[in-house]
Image (spheres, rainbow, N blue to C red):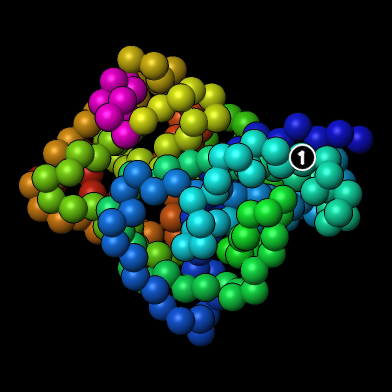
Amino acid sequence: MKYILPTLAIACSLINTTPGADAGERTNMRGERYGEILLGKGGLLIPSEFDVYNTIGLNDCPEELWSKLDPEKIKKETGVKAVKLNGPRYWVIDGLTGSTLVSKVQRNFGGIEMRHAGTLELSIKDKLSLGKAYATHKVARKTIWVFKAGRPVYQLINPDGEVYFMQSFSVQKEKQKLDSLEQLGSKLKLPEGWKFRTLNLKKDFELKAINGIAYVLQDNLENTYQKSSAKISDDL
């Protein structure tokens, strides 16, 4: 059976799920390009978990190599049930802290070095909402995204006033650039009551998981966002 898998919002940035690994900190990440490969296994019709590999900290996911990757070939080589190419993507964060390596072992996919970033387990709810834009998923995470003062941030706001910060944008459905994101609101198919806005930060802002859980979603262009504990009325 051939699987056509949507991008998984929760896969993006699985960097830090293993206790005891060396903590990490990175800066100057805005606009940095990366790619991910998800290897699905287990389950019946839909894989129950995915091993996530990415290029973060290794390379910029070279287009001349990425464009030649064949999911079916990778599937045969790895013996998994399904393969999803998630990328290329570009960071909108300025840095991160509290990141840990799940594994230092590298693996080569079509000439692109990647590192195992974590294993993503899908709940029944996750499986039912695969491919649905604006569906929120949960992932255990300690990594803190850093946004610098004076830099623009891009936010989704739901009817309850909850704010989601964009952490990365995709070019898989539309050829976006950093300087085109301010016009993104006119291209999104927002659910009723949702809003998109651009905000220039007055001070540095750290986006943390809520009680160790990151609530993430993707818009209809596969840009990825994480919910903040700060509400719309907060002075950012």
Is residue 140 visible to the viewer in this orientation of the structure? no
Q: Position of residue 140 (x, y in %)?
A: 51, 63
Specify the quadrant of the image occupied by residue 166.
Answer: top left
What residue is rendered at 17% in x and 44% in y? 151
Above or below, 113 against 47 in this view is below
183 magenta-colored: yes
Q: What stretch is highlighted in magenta?
A: 178-185
Q: In this view, does 122 lie to the left or right of 4?
A: left
| Residue 226 location (% of width, % of height) | 39, 47
Which residue is farthest top?
Answer: 186
Q: Can residue 193 be seen in this view?
A: yes
In which image quadrant can residue 28 be found? bottom left
Which residue shows up at 62% across the image and 31% down it? 131
* Label 1 crowd (10 A; few <14 / some 14-19 / many >=20): some
Amino acid on which the number 1 mark rests in the picture? Asp
Report the front residue among 130 and 193: 130
Q: In this view, does 47 lie to the left or right of 100?
A: right
| Farthest-out residue, right | 1
Up/down of 84 relative to 157, above or below? below
Residue 190 falls inside the magenta stretch: no
Image point (52%, 73%), residue name: 101
Determine whether, in the image, residue 47 is placed left or right of residue 159: right
- Residue to which mark 1 is pinned: 70
Picture coordinates of residue 230 (x, y %)? 23, 49
Up the image or down, 126 lies above or below 181; here it is below
| Image vertical order of residue 4 relative to residue 205, above or below | above
SS class, disc 1: loop
Quarter of the picture holding the N terminus? top right
Q: Position of residue 214 (x, y in %)?
A: 44, 55
Instruction: Say which residue appears at 80% left-offset and 48% top-offset.
Output: 74
Magenta region's main secondary structure? helix
